[in-house]
Each structure stands twice: as C-alpha cells, then as structure tokens.
C-alpha cells in the first residue's frame, strides 16, 4: 500500500510532454508492486519512479531519429493501447504451444500477467529458481537489486516504459556451478481484447559463476476464436476473425556471470495485427558464453533491440537471427555488441527472408575500443528477397579503435537463383516445390541452431504453413 | 545400338535459339532413337551446352525457330519439370551446389515427384533409403554423401557421379550428359562409363556431350556428331571420333566452310 501511495505522488512529475507517450505512461501507473519483501518493494518502486521521470524528457521516436530511420511507428501510434488486458485462457488452448522438453519448467504470462494455472514448475532441476517475481521468497528478493533493471541502456525509451510498469517478472536464477539440462520455457501469450491491449512482459535471467542454462522466450498470440472455451470444435486458426491490434513491449535482462553459459532462443510470433517492441540486454562477465537464436516471424511491426555488453576477457558471443516476413510486415533488428576488455570473440549471422511488400531492417553495431585488443568479431547479414516489392535496409556499424583485432562484416541481398531453380526443376520438382526447397534451405541453417528439437520442428512447420496460406491467398 | 524399327525418342528440327538477342544455336538437326547412344563433340563455345539446356527448357534461352519433338510431342512450351517428368534428364556440366538441401531429401523429392506423375504413391523415407543405397553401388558413392548438402564441397568427380546417381534413380527415356566425363581421373571415368553402360537399355537413349575421345573407349557410341557455331556440321559413326582424335577439328572446319561457301 505504501508503494502505491509513493507512486501516486510522482505521477504528476512523470508526465511526458509527448501526448502519445504520456498516454502509454499513464497505462503503466495502474498497478502497485507486490513483493514478499517490503524493503525490496520500496526499492523497486523507486526504480519504477526513476524510469517514469526519465520519460518526462522523452518523446516517441520518429524517422528523424537515427535509431529509427527506417522504422515508422505511426501505424502503432494510431491505436490507444490500454493496459487492462485481463484475459483467462483455458489450459487446453495452450497445449499446442507448450514444449515437451520443458513440460515442468514453463512459465506462462497472459497479456503480461503471470498465469499460475498455465505455468508448470513442478519439477525444477536442482539449483535453479524459475518463477515469477511476486512469488519469490523474501529471503531471495533482496539479491535482485544488483540485477533487475540494472543493465546498461535502461534509459532507452521502450525499456524505460517497461520498467515504469514493472510489477512482476519471470525470474530464472541459476546458482553457481549448476548445469541446468532442461530448457526453461517462458511463454508470453497475447489475447487481444476489444480495446487494443498493451502488455509489458519482463524477464530476468541470472546464470551465476560456471552455471549453464537454456532459456526459450516465446511471444505469440491467441486470436479470440482460439481462446473460446472448449466447445468440442477444433480451435479455429488465426485469421478467421479479423485479428485485433495489440502492443507487446517486452524487456529481458540476462546476466552471464564468470564462466557461465546461457543459450537463449527468442521466438517472436505475434499475430499479423500485433505490434512488438522487444529488448534483450545481456551482460557477460569474463569467460562466459552466450548464444542468441532470435526468430522473428510475426507482428505487423516489430523491433528487436539486442544489446550485449562484454565485461571481461575471453567472453564468447554468438548471435543468430532469422526474420521471415511477408505481406505488409516490417521487422527491425538492432543489435549491438560492446567490448571493454581484450580477447573476446563474437560471431553473428542474421538472415532475412522477405516476401510481398514486407520490409526488413538490420543494424548491427560492434564497438571495439582501445581496451579491447585481440577481439575477434565477425558479422554477416544475408537477405533473400522473394518479391520485387520486398525490401531491406541493412547497415553494419563497426566502430573499431583498437588496432590489433580481427573484425569482419558483410551484407548480401539476393533472390532465388534462377540456375538453382532450373537445376531442381530439371529433376521434376514443380516451381513451388523448388522454391520452397530453396527457401527452407536458407532458413534451415538458422533453425538448425535451435537446441530444442520440438521447437525446431514446429518453427519449420509454421514457416511452411505461412507460405501455404500465402499460396492459397494468391491462387 | 542401332535398330531398324525402334521408336524415335528425340527429333530436333532446325532449332535456333538465342540468349538476350544473341543467336547461339543456328539450326540444329538431330534424331535419336530408342537404344542408341549419340556423342556430340565440338570445340569450346560451339554450343553444346546451350543445346542441352535448350532441350531441358532453361528459361534464359529463347527458341526462335524449329521444334523439339520428344516422345512424339512438341515440348517447346513445356516447363523444365514437365520435360523431366516426361522422361528427359540432363546431367549438368557444372552441377549446382545447394547448401542446406540434403542430398537425400533432394533425391527423395525428385523421385517422388516422378511417382506422383505416374499416379503412384510417394515412397516413404525408409524404403527410399534402401533404393538409394542400391543405386549408390552403381556409382561407388559412400552413403555418407546422402547426409551432406547437395553437391556442397563435393569434388568435381563426386558431383559428376552424383548426376549419374540421379539418372539411375529417375530412369529417363533420354539422358543427356553434358561433359560428365571431363575432369575425371581414370578411375572415376570408368565408374561413370560403367554407370552409363548399365543404364543404357533398348527402350532409352543417351546423348553424351564431350570434348574428349577418351570416354568413347568405354562407352561405344552409335553416332558421333560434331558441332560448330551452333549447328551440327558433321555426323558419322564411332570412327569419326577416332579421326577427330588424330586430326583435330580443323579439317572438319575447313570442309564445313567450303560446304557453306558452296551453297
Ligand atoms: N547465358 C549466356 N549468355 C551469354 N552467352 C552465352 C550464354 N550461354 C552461352 N553463351 C555463349 O554461347 C556460346 C556457346 O556456349 P556453350 O556453353 O553452349 O558452348 P559449349 O560448346 O558447351 O562449350 P564448352 O565446351 O566450353 O562447354 C559461347 O560463345 C557462350 O559464350
Ligand atoms: Mg559446355
């Protein structure tokens, strides 16, 4: 209750001059922090207040902002998103979205709100906490203060907006030396309501010294028809009813401490009317290994900010990205790797498959200051355009001031090779089978890197399904 | 083998074709009957590969005149896959590398496309693997190739053997081999030649495009044709190949020139 009061007093101060942003900010101020430990609750309230007030000086980005040059947010700003998206989802409806490999290591959030009913953490591996923030015992929460909302770059507008509304979060906490073999599945479901819904999910992953874990962060939506209680009929697929607009503004913070290993698979499959803004902020300590497999299929407009801060030598970073879009979709990936110490390595491969009038944006920054000698960083962005109207803006931005490094970057834009198609067709494959084989092959290189077999399988299937729908639509 | 009454599989009449406005084939005539093996020879750039690609339906080449009758039907309007399903097979001079497509998957999709065409059920993965392993024997390829991406990182010889493997699976009525013999060491050459011989049957035909007389020591052609400037200028029996080996192409070119000027 205390927290609630202190918050209200700040509300007046934390009004942005930007009307639209101000509207979003107001949506953040509804719920109070409810933690088991009041001291931490007070601390968290201060973090929220700080984020709110930092936004007072901000305004919504426009194409005049360097970071948003190619991504026009005006389609998003046509909607008044409301953060009251309470929705109940029957367990049977999410069955198809769960992963057998993570059947007892799953947290589910619906419109950003933790669902105890849909989550299952009944058989957690030893040495790891997986749960939501408000259920965490008082004895543990105080330790969060070094991690939660403590990553660099927290002042970025959408990150601050998420922090301003931070009441709960998914927390994964691996104790030192714990090797967690079971993948942990964070499923963020959107169930859009009558009014455009705003969800601001949050996740915190901490792998302490020499711990190792695998996390799958997945964003998807249930259309209204899919979420109907079981009537005996098969759930209708998306697209049967006109999908409703909604906005997901997600933030995930990952800490890989000394010699820890984190494998992070991030799947964005929002509906075609959804808007998705997501931040992944990763801090790596010395000798740590971090791998990101970021898959982006969904959303009318999406943006992924992927920031990796390497603080300690011999850290190893692998960033794999696959964007597959069609129709009018826009998908923007902005990644940044910042080094501060020598002897680190990174390898980044980001692929886009762009069809129809869809638009992909890739911006990959790598900062190698003087202190980061002997860095070995490779970056490649490969784009496959499937239609004459499809387009991509790609920009590697290497900023290197160290003089003894091995850094490479490149970008390619290609179409399906006429000669490859001819080769396949000369063996009897019809045009669409030949095209699909080549497109699948382009995507397979990325999908193969996902360590969870069932997820790999459903993702390749949904890729093909997406193209199938398209072919029908055309026919 | 030449037989009096066997069916005509391929009949090319006065075929002319161009690429981006440049004529490359200038009136090719060729008739191939069931049971026959033909060799087409000629210098670099004489149009041999172009002929094979035009036959297979490559979209870059525009046929400006003439016709291609294959199995009794004019196929000029057919897509490459329709031609393939009708029994045409082209072994590429430069087989393409396709990363991410496993050789086994590719072979299965190709094989099943043909089964579908024939109204047969698709063959499942297990049965298909058995079938392929049997065919692998023919070209002496290790089964480990099946797991690799199609032609990716294959040596020249391995690529050519992979083409013969595909031909063995698809059992075409007409196999056109574009320089499948070039660049091979003698062991690989023998494997390829042996594959071609085993696949040659009374009801199918083979057209071997080659630079070198060498393969003809292992695969005996019924006819040898010489191409120059986009047409077949001389045809003969297998002794023509021997003559080419000894005398080179010049005498043919001289004769062809005098023939043209005499017209
Ligand atoms: N796609 C193309 N675009 C432009 N020119 C072409 C194209 N294809 C073939 N040509 C030209 O047509 C001529 C015949 O080429 P082709 O490849 O058919 O010869 P070839 O007899 O197969 O030669 P080789 O023995 O070297 O394989 C050459 O001059 C070649 O440069
Ligand atoms: Mg050639």
Image (cartoon, rainbow, N blue to C red):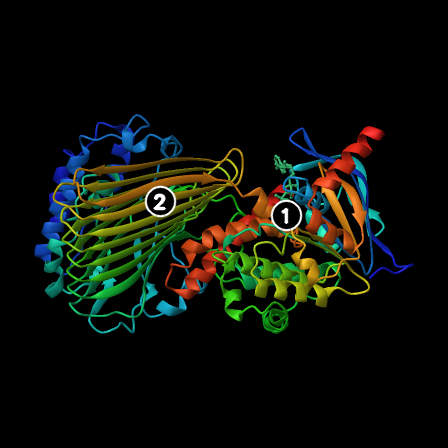
Q: Is mark 2 within 8 Å of ligand 1?
A: no
Say which mark, if any, is on residue A239: none
- In front: B64, or A303? B64
Q: CA distance from mark 1 to mark 2?
A: 29 Å
Q: Residue at x 64, y 38 (%)?
A: B60
Chain letter of mark 2 equals: A
Neighbour class for label 2 at 10 Å: few (<14), some, many (≥20)? Answer: some
Up the image or down, A97 lies above or below A177; here it is: above
Q: Secondary structure at mark 1?
A: helix
In the image, farthest residue toward the right: B5
The image quadrant that residue A392 belongs to is top left
**Left or right: A363 in relation to A344:** right
**Left or right: B122 in relation to B5:** left
Say which mark, if any, is on residue A431: 1
Say which mark, if any, is on residue A380: 2
Q: Residue at x 37, y 43 (%)?
A: A381
Q: Quadrant of ligand 2?
A: top right
The image quadrant that residue A210 belongs to is bottom left
Q: Secondary structure at mark 2?
A: strand
Q: Residue at x 19, y 35 (%)?
A: A55
């Amino acid at each position: 209750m205390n927290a609630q009061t202190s918050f209200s007093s700040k509300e007046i101060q934390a009004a942005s001059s930007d009307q639209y942003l101000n509207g979003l900010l107001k949506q953040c101020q509804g719920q109070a922090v409810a933690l088991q430990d009041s001291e931490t609750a007070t601390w968290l309230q201060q973090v929220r207040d700080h984020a709110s007030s930092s936004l007072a000086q901000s305004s919504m980005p426009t194409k005049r902002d360097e970071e948003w040059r190619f991504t026009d947010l005006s389609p998003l700003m046509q909607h008044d998103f409301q953060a009251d998206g309470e929705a109940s989802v029957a367990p049977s409806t999410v069955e198809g979205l769960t992963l057998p490999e993570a059947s007892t290591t799953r947290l589910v959030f619906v419109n950003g709100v933790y669902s105890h009913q849909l989550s299952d953490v009944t058989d957690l591996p030893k040495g790891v906490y997986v749960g939501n923030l408000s259920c965490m015992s008082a004895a543990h929460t105080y330790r969060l203060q070094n991690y939660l909302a403590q990553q660099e770059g927290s002042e970025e507008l959408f990150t601050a907006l998420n922090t301003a509304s931070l009441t709960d979060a998914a927390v994964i906490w691996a104790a030192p030396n714990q090797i967690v073999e079971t993948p942990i599945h964070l499923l963020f479901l959107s169930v859009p309501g009558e009014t455009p819904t705003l969800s601001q999910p949050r996740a915190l992953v901490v792998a302490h010294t020499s711990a190792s874990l695998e996390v799958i962060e997945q964003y998807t939506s249930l259309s209204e028809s899919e979420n109907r209680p079981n009537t005996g009929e098969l759930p209708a697929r998306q697209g049967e009813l006109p999908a409703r607009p909604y906005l997901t503004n997600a933030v995930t913070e990952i800490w890989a401490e000394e010699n820890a290993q984190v494998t992070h698979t991030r799947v964005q499959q929002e509906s075609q009317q959804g808007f998705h803004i997501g931040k992944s902020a990763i801090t790596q300590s010395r000798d740590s290994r971090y791998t990101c497999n970021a898959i982006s299929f969904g959303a009318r407009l999406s943006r992924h900010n992927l920031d990796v801060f390497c603080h300690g030598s011999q850290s190893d970073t692998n960033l794999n990205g696959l964007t597959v879009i069609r129709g009018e979709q826009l998908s923007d990936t902005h990644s940044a790797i910042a080094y501060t110490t020598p002897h680190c390595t990174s390898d980044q491969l980001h692929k886009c498959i762009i069809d129809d009038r869809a638009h992909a944006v890739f911006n990959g920054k790598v900062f190698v200051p003087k202190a980061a000698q002997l860095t070995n960083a490779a970056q490649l962005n490969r784009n496959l355009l499937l239609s004459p109207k499809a387009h991509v803006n790609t920009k590697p931005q290497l900023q290197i001031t160290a003089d003894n490094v091995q850094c490479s970057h490149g970008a390619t834009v290609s179409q399906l090779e006429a000669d490859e198609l001819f080769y396949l067709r000369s063996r009897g494959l019809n045009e669409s089978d030949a095209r699909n084989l080549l497109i699948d092959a382009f995507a397979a290189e990325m999908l193969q890197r996902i360590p969870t077999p069932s997820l790999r399988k459903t993702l390749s299937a949904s890729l093909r399904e997406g193209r199938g729908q398209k072919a029908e639509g055309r026919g | 083998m030449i037989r009096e009454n066997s069916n005509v599989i391929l009949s090319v009449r006065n075929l002319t074709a161009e690429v981006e406005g440049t004529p490359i084939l200038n009136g090719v005539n060729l008739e191939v009957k069931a049971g026959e093996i033909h060799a087409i020879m000629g210098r670099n750039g004489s149009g041999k590969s172009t002929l094979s690609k035009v036959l297979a339906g490559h979209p870059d080449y525009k046929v400006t005149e003439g016709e291609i009758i294959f199995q009794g039907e004019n196929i000029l309007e057919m897509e490459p896959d329709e031609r393939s399903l009708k029994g045409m097979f082209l072994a590429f001079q430069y087989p393409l590398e396709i990363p991410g497509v496993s050789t086994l998957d590719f072979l299965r999709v190709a094989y099943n496309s043909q089964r579908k065409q024939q109204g047969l059920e698709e063959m499942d993965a297990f049965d298909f693997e058995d079938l392929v392993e049997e065919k692998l024997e023919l070209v002496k390829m290790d089964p480990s190739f099946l797991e690799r991406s199609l032609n990716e990182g294959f040596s020249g010889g391995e690529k050519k053997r992979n083409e013969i493997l595909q031909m063995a699976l698809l059992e075409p009525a007409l196999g056109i081999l574009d320089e499948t013999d070039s660049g091979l060491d003698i062991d690989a050459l023998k494997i390829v030649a042996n594959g071609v011989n085993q696949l040659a049957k009374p009801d199918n035909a083979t057209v071997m495009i080659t630079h070198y007389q060498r393969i003809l020591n292992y695969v005996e052609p019924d006819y040898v044709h010489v191409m120059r400037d986009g047409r077949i200028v001389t045809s003969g029996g297998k002794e023509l190949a021997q003559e080419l080996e000894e005398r080179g192409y010049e005498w043919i070119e001289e004769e062809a020139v005098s023939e043209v000027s005499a017209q």
